[in-house]
Amino acid sequence: MKRLTWLADSRSKVKSFPADVRDGIGYALYLAQLGEMSSTSKPLHGFGGGVLEISANDASGTYRAVYTVSIGDLIYVVHAFQKKSKSGIETPRTEIELVRQRLSQLRREVKSAEAKKS
């Protein structure tokens, strides 16, 4: 089973979500740890393979968690947020940019750690 690693404030954000949303995201991440993919997960396009977005809804709105399984033997939860916009199904640009920044930093850190091992 792969281990979860939470980046920045992603864990506290998920903990702040409503209980049913937390449960749904938690179960989807558990399946990812087992090498499976939840029906609530889908590839997040524009980031290369292995970056996925979990979607969960309740009466208070739509919630997202973004994770990656493509770096090493860990699953990195990169970002979590409540979608504020009711229009369309796209993830807001500001959230996408934050995911892009965190993934870029993560990839640099992993590359640097691998270089030190060599």
Image (tube, helix red, strand yellow):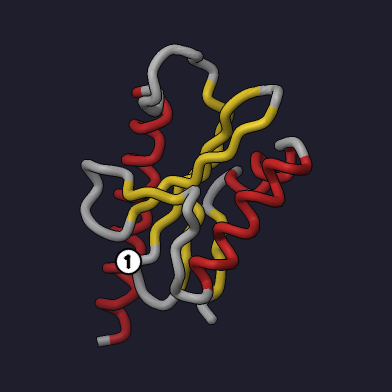
56 shown above or below 42: above
How many badges with numbers are in the image? 1
Residue displayed at 57% across by 28% down? 62
Q: Counting other residues with Cα less than 10 Å from the Cα at mark 1, is it few (<14), some (14-19), or many (20 or more)? A: few
Residue displayed at 38% across by 51% down? 52
Question: Could you tell me residue 87's position as x and y percent?
Answer: 43, 12
| Amino acid type shown at disc 1 | Ser
The extreme right residue here reads 19
Quadrant hosting residue 101: top left
The extreme front residue here reads 39
Residue in front for this viewpoint, 18 or 105: 18
Instruction: Assign the N terminus to one quadrant of the image.
Output: bottom right
Instruction: Assign the C terminus to one quadrant of the image.
Output: bottom left
Q: Which residue is mark 1?
A: 70
Question: Could you tell me residue 86's position as x and y percent?
Answer: 50, 14
Question: Could you tell me residue 60's position as x and y percent?
Answer: 69, 22
SS at badge 1: loop
Residue in front for this viewpoint, 98 or 93: 93
108 left or right of 75 in image: left
12 left or right of 89 in image: right
Question: Could you tell me residue 106's position as x and y percent?
Answer: 37, 56
Quadrant hosting residue 5: bottom right
Residue displayed at 45% across by 54% down? 67
Residue displayed at 42% across by 29% down? 95
The extreme bottom residue here reads 118
